[in-house]
Image (cartoon, helix red, strand yellow):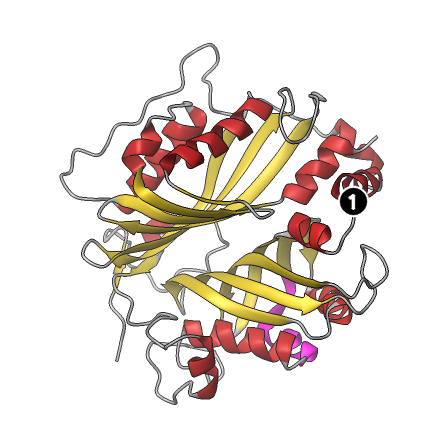
Amino acid sequence: MADKQTPKDEGKANGGPSPPDDGASHNSARMMPTDFSISLAAKGGTDNLLLNPGDERLQSMRGFEDTYVDIIDYIVRITHRIWEEKDIGYIYDTYRHNSRVYDDYGLQYGSEKIVADTVHTINAFPDIRLFADEIIWAGDDVSGFHTSHRTVISGHNTGFSRYGPPTGKKVLLWCIANCVSVENEIFNEWVIYDTASMILQLGFDLRKMAREFGNQMESGADSEVAGEGERLPGQGKPVYLLPSSAGRFDIEEFIRRSYHNIWNRRMLNEVMRAYHPSLQFRGSTGRGFSGRGDYQAHVLSILAMFPDLALTIDDIYWMGNDDEGYLAAVRWSIAGSHRGNGIYGQPTGRPIKMWGISQHRIVDGAIAAEWMLFNEFAVMQQIFRD
C-alpha cells in the first residue's frame, strides 16, 4: 500500500532525481503526506510497532535495509536499537560518516562524535528509555526523508556526566529531533533536549551551571558579529501579512503568517485567530498551560526580555489534510539582545542566539496543540557568563 503524497509545487522541472535536501525549506520539491496512513498512530504506538513491525513495504525505501517497511518504522527501530538495546555501533550504519548534528552545544560533526556523545549519555543514564510521542514526516527516498521525532526520555542518573557526579535521581524530559535521511543514513540532524529541565531535576543550581558552562565558551564568543534582524526594513514598519485570497486553507501560508505577525510585528491579538480557545501547550523547562491567554503571556514574557527580537522560520513541513487536520514541524531561530526584565534577571544587554523546534496539531484552521522546545540552557549561558 502506497501512501498518498503531494508536491507543494507541481511545476517541478523534468530532468531526473533531485539531490538530497540539506534541511532548508525547499517545499517546492518536497512531498507532504496528505493522510496519516503512515504514522505512529496508524501503527498503534511504539510498543506495537516494535513487537510487530510487519514485513511489507508501505512506501519506497530505496537504499534502506530490507527490514524497514517505512520511514516511521526506521526512525522508531533505529532509536530503540541504539539507545535501549545499546547497540551504539549501529550509529555507523545509520549516520553518514560526515553527518552534522546541531544541538545545545553547537555543531557536532561526524559519526564518531555522535558515537562518543551517545556513550556519554547512556553511561550517565544506563536505564534510559525513549518513548516516541509523535513523528511528523515528509519527503521521499530520492530527495530525502524529513522526520520530526518527539520523544519523552526517562532514566536514573547513576553514572558520571558532563554536569557532575551521579545523583541517583530520575529525570523525565522532552526531546525533539529533526532528521534528514537517505539510503539508510541520517546526514543532518537538529536536536533539542530539554537540558535546563534535566539539570533542575538532577538537583543542580541551573544559573550557576549556566555561568560555569558559559565561561567555558570560546574566548571569541563575545566578538561574534551580531547584525540587525530582518524584522524591520530600516526605519520602516514590519510588514503585516494578510491571509491568502486563494479561498482555501494553505497550511504553510498560515504558519508563516501567524509566526511573523505575532512574533515580528508584535500583534498578540493574532493569537486569538491562529490558536484554538482550548489550546494545549507544552514548552521548555516544565512550561505547560491551557488556553490562549496564557500563550499570549508566554510570548509577551519573551518579547519583554528581548525587545529587539527577530524570528526566522528555517524549515517547515507537515502531514495531513483539511478534514483530518494537520501535524506540522517548524524549526525556527531568534536573534536579539537581553534588554528587558524577566526570568533571567536584570538586563545584561548581551546578544543571544536562540533556536528551537515546534510541533503543531492544527484542526479546522487553528492550532489546537503546540509543543515548543528551545535551547534555553544555551541562552542562559550566553546571558550569565562572566
* Residue 378 among magenta residues: no
Residue topped by disc 1: 205
* Residue 89 among magenta residues: yes
Q: Is residue 83 above or below residue 277?
A: below
In the rendered image, the quadrant that contains the N terminus is bottom left
Q: Position of residue 5 (x, y in %)?
A: 27, 64
The kind of secondary structure element at disc 1 is: loop
What's the residue type where badge 1 is placed?
Answer: Asp
Q: Is residue 128 above or below residue 162?
A: below
Q: Position of residue 16 (x, y in %)?
A: 34, 64
Residue in the foreground of this view, choosing between 244 and 280 = 280
Q: Position of residue 170 (x, y in %)?
A: 69, 64
Q: Position of residue 265 (x, y in %)?
A: 41, 23
Query: Image quadrant of residue 347?
Result: top right
Query: Image quadrant of residue 377?
Result: top right
Residue 144 seen from this side? no
Start and end of the magenta stretch?
87-99
